[in-house]
Amino acid sequence: MNGKPTKVLVVGAHSEEGLRRFRALPGCSLVITENFRDIPREDLQEAEIFVGLPNPDMVRQMPRLRFIQLYSAGANNYSWLPKEITLANAYGAYGESISEHMLTTTLMAMKRMPEYLRMQDRQEWTLLDNIDRFAGSKVLSVGMGAIGTAYLRKAYALGAECWGVRRTLHDRPDFVRDLVTPEGMDALLPEMDVVALSLPGTDDAAGMFDERRLRLMKKSAILLNVGRGNCVVTEDLLRVLKDGWFKAVCLDVMEPEPLPKGHPLWTAPRVWITPHISGGYRAGVNYDQVTDAVIRNLTLVLQGQPPVHVVDRELGY
């Protein structure tokens, strides 16, 4: 080291309070901008730490870069990153916000609220049947990271029986009846009232819910997806919906994304779509939690300590 303060580049939109917190970091020379293209060349040449969502062209312009901190929890698109650069994500910052979205959509589907809201637009007074109770329902979370775990905790608090699927079996929470690997999931699917997907965008997860697996589920089941759209095969989903499967399919992520106008998912029966809004900076509390995670890691790295939530480039999380 040459005694100069560590050059840190922060790219993205931030609140005034967020900017204040970044500027309070000790031992660094800070550059904050909403657009990477606005960073002077000399700052790029000196940058050792980058906060944001990088691409290969950005990284090529920062020859001294040694640490990247993502705003996102998802980190599966960075296999191209040189191994000498440490990558960390914002794991844990999204669990509460996204799980609240999941709980909202589950309850709306069980109570058929989207249909009632459409009836209101038509000024129609009709009582719908097949209204479900959350208490006593069987809920499966496919993915037991911060998001899936937070969702099951909330589901259990409302009286649901909970199961989880994770790649390796460890640390079963008290509110989960059983954990299984993906290989053991098929035996559970026919019994579940709700199947909630919060999977990362890894090769193993891609296409996991194809026609065979979708048809294993009850026709009256509710399917949620807040992880990555490609874990559900869209064409297969449309096919089983046409055959009468699912009480509701609540999609915050889908394949393709953004969903183009005219795509059959928009008008598929019993499909409720939100445009990838359950996470990100759209919720104020989520912004605060992401900023907490980023500031915590920057502080560790600037103090010469290892960061937390370092991404395994092979696993993608």
Image (spheres, rainbow, N blue to C red):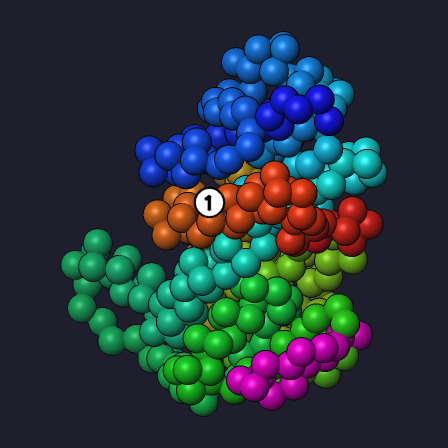
Relative height, residue 55 to residue 162 (above, below): above
Tell me what residue is drawn at x 56 percent, y 64 percent.
146
Q: Which residue is mark 1?
A: 291
Magenta span: chief secondary structure? loop
Q: Amino acid at mark 1?
A: Thr
The quarter of the displayed image where residue 1 is located: top right
Magenta-tinted stretch: 169-183
Tell me what residue is drawn at x 38 percent, y 65 percent.
104
- Tell me, yes or no, whether the highlighted magenta stretch contains residue 213: no
Tell me what residue is drawn at x 37 percent, y 34 percent.
20
Mark 1 lies on a secondary structure that is helix
The quarter of the displayed image where residue 49 is located: top right
Relative height, residue 26 to residue 163 (above, below): above
Task: From the viewer's perspective, tell me whether residue 281 is left or right of residue 124.
Answer: right
Tell me what residue is drawn at x 66 percent, y 24 percent.
3
Instruction: Report how many numbered discs are placed on residues in the image.
Output: 1
